[in-house]
Amino acid sequence: MPSKIEEPVLNGHKAFDNQKVLEAQKVLDGHKVLDGQTVLELTATNGHAVEPTWSGATRLKHLLRDSNELIVCPGVYDGLSARIAMSVGFSALYMTGAGTTASRLGMADLGIAQLHDMREHADMIANLDPLGPPLIADMDTGYGGPIMVANAVQQYIRAGVAGFHIEDQVQAKRCGHLQGKKVVDKETFLARIRAAKGAKDKYRSDIVLIARTDALQQHGYDECISRLKAAREIGADVGLLEGYTSKEMARQAVEDLAPWPILLNMVENGSTPVINVEEAQKMGFRIMIFSFAALAPAYTAIKATFERLKRDGVVGTGKDLTPVKLFEVCGLKESMKLDLEAGGLAFAEGV
C-alpha cells in the first residue's frame, strides 16, 4: 500500500487543493486532484494516472469544443426535478433562477434570490451525481460589483457547477421574459464579465462562462450584438441574447456572432416564439435551455391534484406510482447497495 504524500499532485501539472495551487510532481494513489476543474482518479501504477474522469465543467467544455451537438438542458428547480431529468437521460441540466426562487423562497423572479440561495441549490443539484449530466446554473447579475461577481464564480466552482450565465440587468432585476427590464451600461456589464473571467482563470477552472444580455427591450438588437461581441473579446465562452421576438432574429444572432457558441433560452408563452430542438439545431445554436420545462407542468399537475383532493377527498395517484417507485428515482437502490457493500443490515429485510 503506497504511503500518502502531503501534496496531491500529478505529473508536473498544477493541482487545485484547498484553494492552493501546487506544482505537481508525483501521483497520489486514490486521491482526487482538481486541475482546471478536471477530476482524475489516480492509481499508483508505475507513476502514471489511469481512468481519467472529467468534472462536469470539463465535460461541458469538451461537448462545446469537440462536437456539433446541440446540448439540450431541461430546466430543473429542485432535487426531484433534477433526478427525473437524469433518469430520462439528458446530457446536461439547467438550474433555473425563476424555478429556484419559486421553489426555495415561494417568490416571483424579481432578483429576490441571492448568492447563498443559488449556490446552495446548485451545490445540491450538481452533487446528486457529480459524474452525471453537467449543470449550467443561473448567476443573475453576479450579486454585486466585481468583487461579489468573483466571489460568486469561486463559490459556483467549488459547488461543482459546470457553467453559468451572468447578465447585464440592473441589480433590481426581473425574469428575462417580463416587460420593463432595465440594463446597466455596457462598461458595467463588461466589468462583470472581466471579474468572472478573472476568477475562472485564478482557480484554473474549466467552468463555462456564458455572457447574457437583456438589452433588447431597452436598446435594441444592434446594442445586444455589440455587447456580446465585446464580452467575447474579453473571454466569455458562450453568448446568450435573451428574449428574441422572432425566429428570424434568433437565426440572425447566431450568424452575426458565428462561430462563437450561442445559447437559446426557450420559455414557451414568454417573449420568444416557440423554437423546437430541431429548428434550434438548424439555426446553429449550441446550447438550448428550457427554463420552465419542470416548473410549469409541476404547477399545472399540483394545482389539479390539490383541487381534486379538496373536491373529492382523494389525491388519485396512479397505482403504478408507489412510494418505492418514487424513492427509486431519488436513489433508493444506490443507497441500499452502499449500505450492503459496507456491511450494513439496514435493508436486510428489504423495503
Image: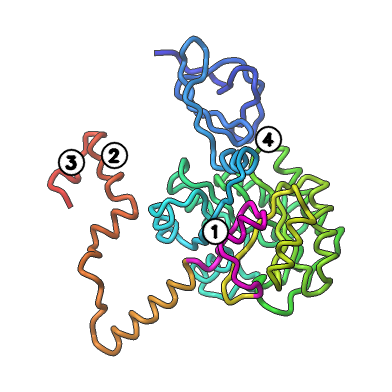
Could you tell me which quadrant the N terminus lies in?
A: top left
Which of disc 4 and disc 2 is earlier in sequence? 4
CA–CA distance between discs 1 and 4? Answer: 23 Å
Residue at 54% x, 58% y: name it: 95
Note whether 152 is above or below 29 in the view shown.
Answer: below
CA–CA distance between discs 2 and 3? Answer: 11 Å
Q: Dot 1 surroundings within 10 Å: few (below 14), some, or many (20 or more)? A: many
Residue tagged 3: 345
Residue tagged 2: 338
Where disc 3 sits, the SS reads: loop
Q: Which segment is the magenta one?
A: 271-293
Residue at 72% x, 72% y: name it: 172
Residue tagged 4: 204
Q: Tell which tag, 1 or 4, sits nearer the viewer.
A: 1
Examine the rendering and report whether any part of residue 117 can be seen: no
Q: Dot 3 surroundings within 10 Å: few (below 14), some, or many (20 or more)? A: few
Q: Residue furthest left?
A: 349
CA–CA distance between discs 3 and 1? Answer: 36 Å
| 194 falls in the magenta region | no
Residue 52 is situated, as x and y percent measured from the top left of the image, at: 51, 27
In the rendered view, does 330 fall on the left or right side of 313? right
Disc number placed over residue 95 in the picture, else none = 1
Which of disc 3 and disc 2 is earlier in sequence? 2
CA–CA distance between discs 2 and 4? Answer: 33 Å
CA–CA distance between discs 1 and 2? Answer: 28 Å
